[in-house]
Each structure stands twice: as C-alpha cells, then as structure tokens.
Image (spheres, rainbow, N blue to C red):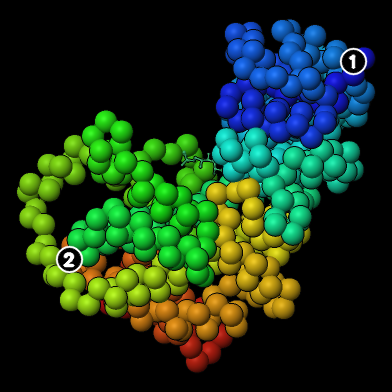
Amino acid sequence: MGTSYIGVYGMGVMGQSIALNIANHGYKTVVYNRSEAKTKSFLESIDNKNISGAYSLEEFLNSLESPRRILLMLTAGPVVDKAIDEIIPYLDKDDIIIDGGNTYFKDTIRREACLKEKGIGFIGAGVSGGEKGALEGPSIMPSGERKTYEAVEKLLMDISAKTPDGFPCCTYIGPDGSGHFVKTVHNGIEYADIQIICDIYQLMRDVGGMNAEEMQQVFEKWNEGRLNSYLIDITSKILKRKDEETGKPILDIVLDTAGQKGTGKWTSMEALDLGVPVPSIVESVFARYLSAMKEDRVKASKVFQQAERKPVLDKARFIEDLENALYAAKICVYAQGYQLLQEASNHYHWDLDLGEISLIWREGCIIRAAFLNDIKKIYSQEKNISNLMLSELFSKALKESYEGFRRTCIMAIENGIPVPGLMSTLSYFDAYRTENSSANLLQAQRDFFGAHTYERVDKEGFFHTVWE
Ligand code: 6PG
C-alpha cells in the first residue's frame, strides 16, 4: 500500500481546486486523470509538496494508504459509473469512494447499494461553491452510511467553508442519495433566486431607465441589509465591471440566452413526482429555455409591439417596492425548496435536519445568504412547521412586504415586462393563502366529463352527479 491519504480522480477545474484545498490542509494527496496531459499540466502549475500525480489506475490506487479514500470529481452521469467499474477490481473491503460531482441522487442511491454489497463504502457528497469555493472551502452535503461518513468526516470538515465564527459548512445529511438530493434542491433554489434577481434587474433597466452604475449602487446597498447574500453581492460586482475592449458595462454585451446543466430540471421533476408545488423553480427552468430561443424572440418582438412604457414618477418608492418584492419572493422561493426537502425526507425516510442544512448553506455555497440564520431559528422554534411562510418571522415580513411585491408585478404587467420568477412566486403566495380556491369548479368538471366524483363541504364521502 502507499502513503497518500486520499486520491482525487478527475482533474477538471473542480477536481484541481479541491485537490489543492485538501493538500493545503496537510493531507497527502495523489491525483489522477484519464488523460495524462491534464495531470501533468496541473502538477506543473502548482508548487505543493503534498500533491503527487499518478499515470495509471494501478499506480493511483496503489499509492493510497489503507483503507483507501478516493474522491471522484467527474462529470455526473455514465462517466462516474465507468470510473467506479474500472477501480473496483483494485479495491479492498472498507475502502471508500466519495462522489463529489453534481450527481442525480437516484444514481447515488443505486451506486451506494451496489457498492455496499461489495463491502465498499460510498459517500455521495453535494459540493457547492464553484471553483473558488472548491479551492477555499465549499459547502459540503455528504450522505451514505454514517460509519462511512465518520471515516471521512474530519477531512470533509477541514476542507469545508467556515462561517466567520468558525462553524464548518459540512454536516452528515443522511443515508444513500440524500446529500446529492439536498444539493439538487440547493440548485433549484439557486435557479429561482437568480431568476427573481434578473426580473428585478430588468424592471430597473427597462422601466426605471436605470444605467449600470445606478443599479450597481442599489444592489450594493441592498447587500448591506436583509437581502445580504452572495448572489446580490455578485450582481453588484457584475454591474460594476466594464469591458476592456469597448469600455461598456460587460453586462450590456453579454448575450441574453441562458445555459443550464440540469439540476434545476431534476428539482422540478422530483417535485412533480412528490406532488410538491415549486412553481418558482419550475418557472425559472422554463425562463432559461425561453431565453435560449433568441431567434424566435427577435422575430416575435417585430410582430408584437412592445407595450408603452409608463414612466416612473417616484424613484425612491419604485426602488423600495423592488426591494420588498425581492425579499418577499425570496422567502416564498426558499419556502418551496424547504417544503420539497421535507416531503422528500418523509418519502425516502431520510430524517433531514432542515435547520442544520440551513447552517451549512451560510458559507461556501451559491445561495449563501444572511437570512439562512433566520431559517435555522425558525426550525429551532417551530420544529414541525409545514411551510416557512407560516413562521412568525417570515409571515410578519411577508405581510410588510407583499404590497410592494404586488405593485411590482402590476408595474411589470402594465409595461409588458416578463418577470416569470416574480409572477409565479406571487401567484404561489396568493394560491397558498386562499381559503376558497376555484378547484370546486375543476372537480365538478372532472365529475361531469369523467365521473371522477367529488367531495362535499357539508358531508363526508365521494359523490357523483348525473350532470345532464
Ligand atoms: C454550486 C453550483 C454549481 C452549478 C452551477 C451551474 O453550487 O456550486 O450550483 O454546482 O453547477 O451553478 O449550474 P447551471 O449550469 O445548471 O446553471
């Protein structure tokens, strides 16, 4: 056996960054990549005595101490299966594989069960924070058998992000695929949070007529208040940056077609399967699809004239409404994500600790935000709360903010500005707080055309009417 504490398989940007992070914490690390060139160029670019390279799987796995710890940093999907199949012949009982990619959680459930039969430990670890986070400390969401987790706990804690008071942003999430599921929902929330910020930006730009500098100042100020978060902070930084070639704000020359790698879609799919309403997340996925139809949009913009813009008369009130809209929408977005986590926890028997998850999302990850402390507080005080919007803290905030939220959506409608994130979120909020919905008519129609029966408000049971 060898002497390296851990092996990192996969030398993409995330793999390189996390290998350095591990080595910087004093762990002897061996790295491996299918193409030798990447390993070589990585080793040439660094000066770290704790990192060595291996150029065959045999060399890689033989240079690890026993039991082996192997961290896979690969593109999610078949590549991970292939890598696992290739390394299995070299492994011994009690060796541990950690998958640190953005893996679909059902793949993690399958892989963990399969490896358990062979006596090999498997940890599915959600890792958030992008390249910088991987290097300086990401938020880590690991799951699997507890004893397997305990064998790598110190390492994961060491390399994770820390809050200013030293709290490590890593905790045992639960069994099998729960860690990757929690990471997926993190990304679903990320999608919706990004979309509502983009909606607000478009209103500032197209209704408020604000330039990049004015918008930047507003976002910077908001970041000092209750909206304080990584995404607001980077929005302000993005608005500040000028293109070196043209001198224009870079944002003005970035093409408006969004990409995605699938985690928002997975969150939406799982919510549909579990019957949990997450319209803001689903809508933010659709908004990205629509944005990518640039040619069609350009054509349609010539067919349908832009609605006449109504000038903003009171700028201070306009900005105040936008802030309220963003805060209220943010509460509703997180409420949807957390409800999905709760339902999945019940369904898959994961026993997720939602308060604890909030704590490890406070640093390192993309959705880090000051108000995650509030969410933790809510789960400590109102343990069995069914939806965060009903908590004392957030219901009060929503009551104070929703007039501004509503005015913002009305303004968008009047000006013909698409705000899919805000509108779907307001509609979710309004539907959630409606005592008498229109579903009585829906049920009557179903019974009319399909004899699907309906329940009555005045007595128990299922009824059918012969409608004609
Ligand atoms: C993170 C991010 C990351 C994700 C990117 C891109 O937590 O570090 O969620 O995992 O891959 O944000 O995602 P999309 O390409 O789907 O926008």
Tell whether 344 sits left or right of 318. right
Task: Mark 1 or mark 2: name the one nearer the start of the chain.
Answer: 1
Numbered label attached to residue 415? 2
Q: Residue at x 57, y 60 (%)?
A: 369
Q: Position of residue 173 (x, y in %)?
A: 75, 51
Numbered label attached to residue 2? 1
Q: Secondary structure at mark 2?
A: helix
**In which quarter of the view is residue 401 placed?**
bottom left
**In which quarter of the view is residue 257 placed?**
top left
Q: Secondary structure at mark 1?
A: loop
Instruction: Work out which quarter of the rendered image holds the C terminus and state it.
Output: bottom left
- Label 1: few (<14), some (14–19) or many (≥20) C-alpha neighbours in 10 Å: few
- Check disc 1 and give the amino acid type: Gly
Q: Residue at x 46, y 84 (%)?
A: 399
Instruction: Work out which quarter of the rendered image holds the N terminus and state it.
Output: top right
Does any portion of residue 87 appear in the rendered image?
Answer: no
Ligand 1 lies under 8 Å from the Cβ of mark 2: no
Q: Position of residue 48 (x, y in %)?
A: 74, 22
- Check disc 2 and give the amino acid type: Asn
Q: Position of residue 314 (x, y in %)?
A: 22, 77
